[in-house]
């Protein structure tokens, strides 16, 4: 079958499997689709098949009943892989939604065909697959273009579901929030400060605004507004790049933590901030999921990753070659980022800060939850 609407009484659906293996940002962007499924089928258990690293962004989500985590180390052996896939398939899902059609996911989908739910009907839903994947699925549709979470949720159209502005979501315990507040206090961030979290690193140079530009922007912005504080994030192997931002800033407004934060710690800190500044990578999606406004510097990527709201701005130089969506610059000079100076970004950032202050969204208080 293709894209015909499915008639499925909500009370008949007991279990749903959502498949989204990677990347971290894409997993966050799958949460609006999970929400739509839970709204339509409130009695159903929603399970998620994903990589172990993504557990951190899905924890405590009340709409998810179970996480099936693929561990590259534990599941290296083919027999262990098969055993894991069979265990998942034996849950007898009424609906399976596959957002990626990756080999591991196809294995689970393929095996699930032999473990039908008690109703006898299993819906296996995905985006329009190549011919060799079609036997694994019962329904598919062409994905709609636009904001990435909307595009992902458009796979649910055969169920009569449509994205209507739902935000990605992350959920935190009060203990996690308290820990984030204590960390900020220890770093010298006060209630009178306007906290900006900064994600200046990326494994792809075509998506990483240069460290010297970030540093200069921090210096210029804090000179114009002494209330600003910039907390610089980094991940494994990124400390040198992040420290280069601090060195280029040459001011106390740039805060470089000596301890690298976990993904959840980083997200909890973003939730406490007034604004998130960074490249096109997972932390920008964390900001949306935490309700924190964002300002993103774009290189090779498009506006399709930007949540459609005035609280979320993505600035690009708008060269003829943008967006190229390439991991290596076809021109060889990465002009879209290297020639985008701090002086060009500064007035746009200041306008966005003014907008946030007018809306009083997180402004001036790291204790606002």
Image (cartoon, rainbow, N blue to C red):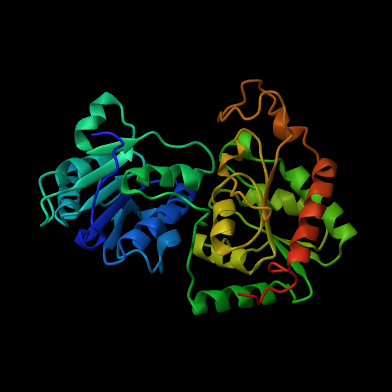
Left or right of residue 52: residue 245: right
User: Where is the C terminus found, in terms of image quarters?
Assistant: bottom right
Which is nearer the eye, 57 or 320? Answer: 320
Who's the residue at 65% across and 63% down the image?
257
Side of 228 relative to 109 (left or right): right
Residue 194 makes an appearance in the image: yes
Q: Position of residue 136 (x, y in %)?
A: 21, 36
Residue at image position (80%, 59%) is 354
As drawn, the residue found furthest toward the right would be 224
- The quadrant of the picture occupied by the N terminus is top left
Residue 74 x %, y %: 26, 52
Residue 295 in the image, given as x and y percentages of width and height: 69, 51
360 relative to 208, above or below: below
- Give the image location of residue 221, x and y in percent: 84, 55
Residue at the image point whose x is 21% and y is 43% from the top = 109
Residue sitting nearer the eye, 169 or 156: 156
Is 351 placed above or below 343 here?
A: below
Note whether residue 248 is visible: no
Left/right placement of residue 286 relative to residue 63 reads right
Q: Is residue 266 above or below residue 135?
A: below
């Amino acid at each position: 079958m293709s894209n015909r609407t499915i008639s499925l009484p909500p009370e008949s659906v007991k279990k749903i499997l959502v498949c989204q293996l990677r990347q971290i940002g894409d997993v966050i962007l799958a949460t609006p689709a999970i929400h739509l499924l839970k709204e339509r089928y409130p009695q159903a258990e929603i399970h998620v098949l994903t990589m172990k690293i993504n557990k951190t962004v899905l924890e405590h989500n009340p709409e998810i009943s179970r996480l099936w985590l693929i561990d590259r180390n534990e599941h290296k052996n083919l027999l262990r892989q098969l055993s894991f896939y069979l265990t998942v398939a034996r849950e007898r899902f009424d609906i399976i939604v596959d957002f990626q059609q990756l080999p591991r996911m196809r294995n689970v989908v393929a095996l699930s065909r032999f473990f039908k739910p008690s109703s006898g009907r299993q819906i296996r839903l995905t985006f329009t697959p190549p011919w060799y994947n079609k036997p694994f699925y019962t329904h598919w549709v062409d994905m709609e273009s636009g904001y990435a979470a909307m595009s992902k949720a458009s796979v649910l159209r055969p169920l009569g579901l449509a994205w209507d502005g739902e935000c990605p979501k992350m959920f935190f315990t009060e203990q996690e929030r308290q820990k984030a507040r204590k960390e900020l206090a220890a770093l010298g961030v006060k209630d009178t400060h306007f906290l900006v979290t900064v994600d200046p690193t990326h494994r792809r140079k075509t998506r990483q605004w240069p460290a010297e530009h970030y540093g200069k922007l921090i210096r210029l912005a804090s000179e114009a507004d002494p209330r600003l504080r910039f907390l610089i994030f980094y991940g494994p192997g990124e400390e040198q790049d992040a420290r280069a931002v601090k060195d280029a800033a040459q001011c106390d407004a740039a805060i470089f933590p000596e301890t690298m934060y976990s993904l959840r710690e980083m997200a909890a800190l973003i939730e406490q901030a007034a604004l998130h500044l960074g490249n096109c990578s997972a932390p920008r999606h964390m900001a949306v999921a935490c309700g924190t406004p964002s300002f993103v510097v774009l290189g090779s990527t498009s506006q399709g990753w930007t949540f459609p709201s005035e609280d979320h701005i993505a600035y690009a130089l708008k060269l003829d070659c943008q967006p190229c969506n390439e991991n290596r610059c076809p021109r060889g000079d990465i002009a879209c980022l290297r020639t985008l100076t701090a002086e060009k970004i500064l007035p746009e950032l200041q306008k966005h800060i003014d907008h946030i202050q007018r809306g009083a969204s997180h402004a001036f208080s790291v204790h606002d939850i």
